[in-house]
Structures are given as structure tokens and as C-alpha cells.
Image (cartoon, rainbow, N blue to C red):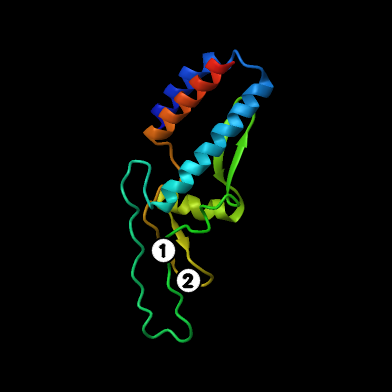
Amino acid sequence: MTNRLETLEDWAAGLLGQLEPASRNKLARSIGQALRRSQQQRIIAQENPDGSKYTPRKRRNLRNKQGRVKQKGKMFQKLRTSRYIKVQCDSNTISVGFTGRIARIARVHQYGLKDRAGRGVTEVKYFQREVLGLTKQNSDFIKAYLLSNLTRQ
């Protein structure tokens, strides 16, 4: 992924140097928002950037649980909302990521780290599920979007 990102950055640097800072800011914001939508769609589809499916949750024995048993839906339903996936950009950078407490949860899943699911619970090793990542389609979209915007000006 890093190689793909560096190639895209080298390719776009010369073209973006010709734009005024205000135009670059506007362009960066629209690309960032499109990337956020793309990440949200990928999370809804429960896919890693390489196209493989997320490792499913572990099954839990809830037979002896007292009270209401809440059925779990797909993973990361709240995490994928615009409230938690933030876009930050200026004339030189675009950043799509998580902030606050949610960033810690996303990082644990992104890299497959150990964490506690609650207070007083033993640490659990989570499977790696890449919540954020640049795909080939994202790279192609950015190139096409830049070209279309630069040819209009």
C-alpha cells in the first residue's frame, strides 16, 4: 500500500503545484470526502482493502446468560459513520481516519493487537481486520478525479 501511495503522490505533485492554495484545498476536501465514502462502503461490505472478507467474530456461548441477549449485527456499524471517520485536509495533505477513543478500537482491529473488551476482563488477541486502507480503485479514482478537475481549469 505504501508503494502505491508514494507512486500516486509523485505523479500528482507536479500537477497540483500549478493550482492556487484555495483550489487545492477545495480539491483535497472533495477527494477526502470521496475516500471516506469509499471506506464506509468497504466497511459495510466487511472487506479488507485487498478484497478478502473480514475474519468473522468468535462465537459466544450465551445460553447461561441472564436477561436480554442482544443479537449482534455486522461489525463496525457505528464505527463507519461520518461522526467517527473524520477527513482532515489542507492544500498539501488529505487524511482520513478515526479520532478519540474510537481510534484506539480501530487501531486494535487494523493491526490485530491485544485489548480488553471491558473492565476486569482478560486481554484478547483480535484478528486483523483492515478498517482503513487504500485500494487500487481508490488510487484510480484519485487519478481520474485530479485529471478531470485539472483539465477543466
Q: Can see residue 91?
A: no
The one nearer the camera, 11 or 3, is 11
The residue under label 2 is which amino acid type? Answer: Val
Do the residues bearing badges 2 and 1 touch, measured as CB atoms within 8 Å? yes
Residue that sits furthest to the front in the current view:
152
Q: Can see residue 14?
A: yes
Q: Position of residue 121 (x, y in %)?
A: 47, 71
The residue under label 1 is which amino acid type? Answer: Val
Is 153 situated above or below 27? above
Is 149 situated above or below 130? above
* Disc 2 target residue: 121
State the quadrant of the N terminus: top left
Q: Position of residue 108 (x, y in %)?
A: 46, 53
Q: Position of residue 128 (x, y in %)?
A: 38, 51
* Disc 1 target residue: 124
Q: Position of residue 75 (x, y in %)?
A: 43, 59
Is 6 situated above or below 58? above
Crowd rating for badge 2 (residues with CA inside 10 Å; few <14, some 14–19, many 20+) = few
Real-space Cα separation, disc 2 to disc 1, in angstroms:
9 Å
Residue drawn at point x = 60 percent, y = 48 percent: 99
Residue drawn at point x = 54 percent, y = 70 percent: 119
Residue that sits furthest to the left in the current view:
52
User: Which element is circle 2 on?
Assistant: loop
Residue drawn at point x = 50 percent, y = 43 percent: 37
Crowd rating for badge 1 (residues with CA inside 10 Å; few <14, some 14–19, many 20+) = few
State the quadrant of the C terminus: top right
